[in-house]
Amino acid sequence: MNNSFGTRITLTLFGESHGPEIGCVVDGLRPGLRVDEDFIAHRLSLRRPGGPGSSARVEKDPFRIVSGVWQGRTTGTPLCILIPNTEARSGDYVNLKNIPRPGHADYAGSVKYKGFADPRGGGHFSGRLTAPLVAAGAIFLAALRERGIRIGTHIARCAGIADRSFGELAADLDALEGAAFPVLDETRGEEMKAAVLAAAREGDSVGGVLETAVLGLPAGLGAPWFDTVEGLLAHALFSVPAVKGVEFGDGFALSELRGSEANDAFRMDEGRIVTKTNHNGGINGGLTNGMPLIFRTAIKPTPSIAASQRTLDLSTGGQTELRITGRHDPCIAPRARAVQDAVTAHVLLDLLESV
Ligand SMILES: Cc1cc2nc3c(=O)[nH]c(=O)nc-3n(C[C@H](O)[C@H](O)[C@H](O)COP(=O)(O)O)c2cc1C
């Protein structure tokens, strides 16, 4: 499947950044799940531009659910959400048809689609397509919440500045749910915002690391080998534009430890089997072990920057100078957090429904 993902619950994304509408179709949801449009609007607001130096393209995202919901509950039939593109300024992209942006999908996409892809605003490759993903994610998050499962993501690093680590998880996830700039330490957050603004003033962009925690998962979820929790999540997370790395638990740092340091010792806690530490991020053998699921993604710097860049003019084959005039965020990480929550919720709900 090219534009769909999921086993029992499939999600299909469609549309282009500057087409009339973008949207998604979710199939396989069980009938009777609550669909709260205010919660969908809230999650969309977390994805919308508004951070430091952020894109002036502020879409209001007036979504419409056109099928699959009746009287606030899923019907069990395909659920379709449409979001109009009201703020597109295609003129910003007129000069990009033959001049691929370094770091963006313009060149690779034009080869794949034999020159017929809609180039405006990154077309189907645009971060804009993550809006319907987040809208669907709100339904998945609410369904997980009914099962006692909660997901939250913070900016663990941005422009080289580190947030504090997760602490008391339930309280941290509460704080993150409403946060427009999702950090656990406000002071570090202010430093990050200043660094993002400084980069933007130089016509540049910065990257970041997003760290997610999932609380309340039962042990034994997933399958060995090809449908490991890590494998499925990595697949979904790498589908998010600008994600260039995924690590679970202590990830790459585990390779520097000895077994005696990396192993998470089992113990009983009020009748529950837990581990003393969580270096493995809640996964053993590709299955959840009942500890919080913890993972991080590396978000690259926004490829579209205002500063002048060298690239090719594909019509002549010669080198050219590119100045991007469109509206772009100098850091994607704050907005991508809502997307990360959404794809995580999709994978986990799909796994729970497949047991
Ligand atoms: C929420 C979100 C917003 C994004 N906004 C922009 C943007 O304003 N400008 C840009 O050049 N890239 C943006 N991107 C990233 C590009 O879509 C992405 O880098 C591009 O499609 C190439 O894919 P790759 O980075 O995965 O290789 C955004 C990504 C996300 C998740």
Image: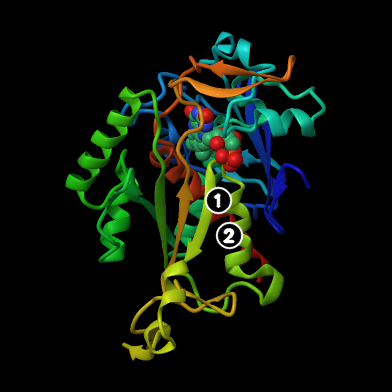
Please report the residue visible at 49 percent of the width from the left and 79 percent of the height from the top.
Answer: 289
Farthest top residue in view: 91
Q: At label 1, which amino acid type do we have?
A: Val
- Disc 2 crowd, CA 10 A, few/some/many (<14, 14-19, 20+): many
Of residues 156 and 95, the one drawn nearer to the viewer in this rendering: 95
Of residues 155 and 69, the one drawn nearer to the viewer in this rendering: 155
In which image quadrant can residue 19 be found? top right
On the image, the x and y values in percent for residue 71 come to 56, 39
Q: Which residue has dot 1 on it? A: 343
Please determine whether, in this image, residue 349 is positioned above or below residue 77: below
Please report the residue visible at 43 percent of the width from the left and 21 percent of the height from the top.
Answer: 307
State which quarter of the image contains the C terminus: bottom right
Q: Mark 1 CB in 8 Å range of ligand 1?
A: no
Please report the residue visible at 54 percent of the width from the left and 12 percent of the height from the top.
Answer: 92
Is there any visible trace of residue 354 in the rendered image? Answer: yes
Residue 348 is left or right of residue 261, and the answer is: right
Of residues 193 and 34, the one drawn nearer to the viewer in this rendering: 193
Q: Which residue has dot 2 on it? A: 233
Please report the residue visible at 39 percent of the width from the left and 52 percent of the height from the top.
Answer: 153
Disc 1 secondary structure class: helix
Q: Is the residue under label 2 in contact with that under label 1 (CB below 8 Å)?
A: yes
Residue 224 is left or right of residue 179, and the answer is: right
Q: At label 2, which amino acid type do we have?
A: Leu
Q: Nearer the viewer, mark 1 or mark 2?
A: 2
